[in-house]
Amino acid sequence: MVVDWTSELVRAALPRAVLTLLSVQQQHGYGMLELLRDHGFERIKGGTLYPLLRRLEEQGLIDHAWEHETSGPGRKVFTLTHLGHAELDRSVLAWNRMNDDLADLRATNRDAS
């Protein structure tokens, strides 16, 4: 099923989605791309995700370590920091509050009609 999310909605939700993925387990970038695409972010590209990962790391919300395998090049594996967990909790509460407020507005509009 293709989800018709506007680019503005994706831009707003993507940082929280990345933090949510990393709250469950560490991930490398390509793995995150695949999971995000499987969960509604079908159009997400590396050119969007990798700069976001860099910004989240600069903000201290995520960290990375290099994982070296016997075949192929090493890759960055990202983890959520303590600050990242706190930001995820804060942003989920804010997102839920906004959703509740929008639902109240819709209900008010229906009642006024």
Image (tube, rainbow, N blue to C red):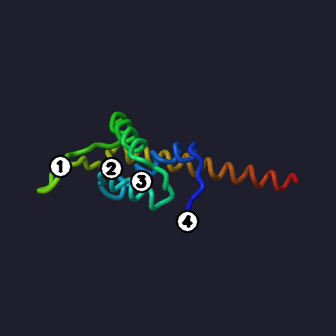
Residue 19 or residue 46, whichever sits in front? 46
Check disc 1: other Cα within 10 Å, few if <14, some if 14-19, many if 20+.
Answer: few
Q: What residue did someone put label 2 on?
A: 29
Residue that badge 3 annotates: 20
Residue 61, located in which quarter of the rendered image? top left
Q: What amino acid type should be assigned to the residue bearing mark 4? A: Met
Pointer 2 and pointer 4: residues touching (CB < 8 Å)?
Answer: no
The reply to whether dot 1 and dot 4 touch (C-beta < 8 Å) is no
Whether residue 88 is situated above or below residue 31 in the rendered picture: above
Q: What percent of the width, then of the height, locates residue 91?
A: 49, 45
Q: Is residue 76 left or right of residue 109?
A: left
Query: In whole angstroms, how far apart are the C-alphas of marks 2 and 3?
Result: 14 Å
Q: CA distance from mark 4 to mark 3?
A: 22 Å
Number of residue marks: 4
The residue carrying mark 1 is: 73
* Residue in the foreground of this view, choosing between 67 and 57: 67
Q: Which mark is residue 84?
A: none
Packing grade of label 2 (10 A; few <14, some 14-19, many >=20) is some
Mark pair 1, 4: CA separation: 34 Å
Q: CA separation, marks 1 and 3? A: 27 Å
The earlier-in-sequence mark between 1 and 2 is 2
